[in-house]
Image (spheres, rainbow, N blue to C red):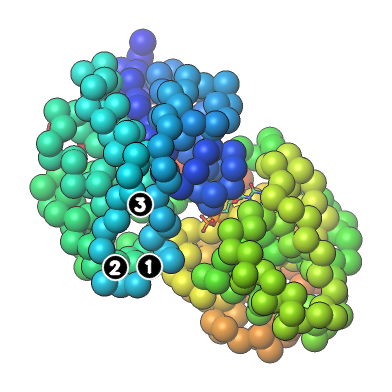
Amino acid sequence: MTTLLGNSLKLLLVSSPLGALGSGSGGGVELTLRNIATELVRRGHSITIVATQGSTSWGMPLVEIAGSPQISAQTQGRDAPTIIPASSVLANFWDYVRQVQTDFDLVVNFAYDWLPFYLTPFLKIPVAHVVSMGSLTEAMDEIIERVAIECPGTIGVHSLAQAATFPFANHCRYLGNGIDLSVYDFCAKPSPWLGWVGRIAPEKGLEDAVAACQLTGIPLKIMGFLQHKDYWQQILQDYPTAPIEYEGFLSTAELQKCLRECRGLVMTPRWVEAFGNVAIEALACGVPVIAYRRGGLVEIIEDEKTGFLVEPDSVSGLVEAIGKLDKIDRYACRQRVERDYSTTAMGDRMEHWFQDIVSK
Ligand code: UDP
């Protein structure tokens, strides 16, 4: 079959080893993988997904593999060693890749883990690596750089800010990201509350959004996977009177229903957010984003037009921006995603990247 750019590809998409697809434990990687897979199928490519047992298939061919999950890299220090647990699901994924590699044109790796990078030169098939986080450990920087040099053009990143955290920034391919706009409804007239969406984990800085809502008295709806229970309990203890409500971890359909009603989305990352899927999900609904001037968010949000970029870690900066939310034209937010972050725009970037790798 022939697609826009050439022959249709047989792609093996290997998921993150943090947990089952649909559980939320993989963070933004889950939605990213789903959107890439759906868009490439629409373009006539053939997709098989390899993921942890118990994953959602989204109607696509899925190979479920059992095993113990990896520890997420963002919980480790810079000099953390590479750890592979007994019965590792990650090792089992790549054992499967080795066995079936001759049936595919390209493997796409979504794991931010040492093993898939290390194994790349040992395989007969090329591997495209979708790198989902910035620089976190020396061991990861070293192994990704080795692949960037030995297999040029195979390291993909979501933002220039993410690439800049690595010593090999010039070897990275910019991919951005994209979402299916038909899934997100535009909401012209919001409700009075604000939203916060993400994994509840220290690197996401939720306490600053809670502090800002305590100061303004504006309610905050919190949506997301409860990854660090102690961290959440500490926030509840530190801000007992804050007007917050936890909605739980929602499906994309439920998430957009709650999110689109928000006056604004508050994003308070302590780390360099590689991209920030939830920013484009909010903008797609017409919800302006107030975010710390950090990481990929700086490339997504146009200050004073689709939201506000605030000095990092400044709660008073958040409060000031909340006071200016009504100045934002919600339709301009939706248009930003239509132009730059649709699945069509993202699919073009992905398809060119895959064809470039396969044709080498
Ligand atoms: N998300 C979700 N349900 C929720 C809250 C969040 O499905 O209730 C998803 C959201 O769609 C996004 C992901 O969680 O894809 C968070 O990704 P992001 O890139 O913002 O951050 P990450 O977790 O990768 O650091």
Give whichever of 226, 146 is nearer the camera. Answer: 226
Name the image quarter holding the N terminus: top left
Residue 273 against residue 241 in the figure, above or below: above
Q: Quadrant of residue 76?
A: bottom left
For badge 1, the amino acid type reads: Gln
Residue 8 seen anywhere in this rendered image of the structure:
yes
**Under tag 2, what secondary structure?**
loop
Q: CA distance from mark 1 to mark 2?
A: 6 Å
For badge 2, the amino acid type reads: Ala
Q: Residues within 10 Å of mark 2 (few under 14, many from 20)?
A: some
* Residue carrying label 2: 80
* Residue carrying label 1: 76
Q: Residue at x 54, y 32 (%)?
A: 55
Q: Residues within 10 Å of mark 1 (few under 14, many from 20)?
A: few
x, y percent for residue 98: 22, 27
**Under tag 1, what secondary structure?**
loop
- Contact, mark 1 vs mark 2 (Cβ under 8 Å): yes
Give whichever of 94, 262 is nearer the camera. Answer: 94
For badge 3, the amino acid type reads: Tyr
Give whichever of 185, 332 is nearer the camera. Answer: 185
Residue 156 against residue 227 in the figure, above or below: above
Query: Mark on residue 112?
Result: 3
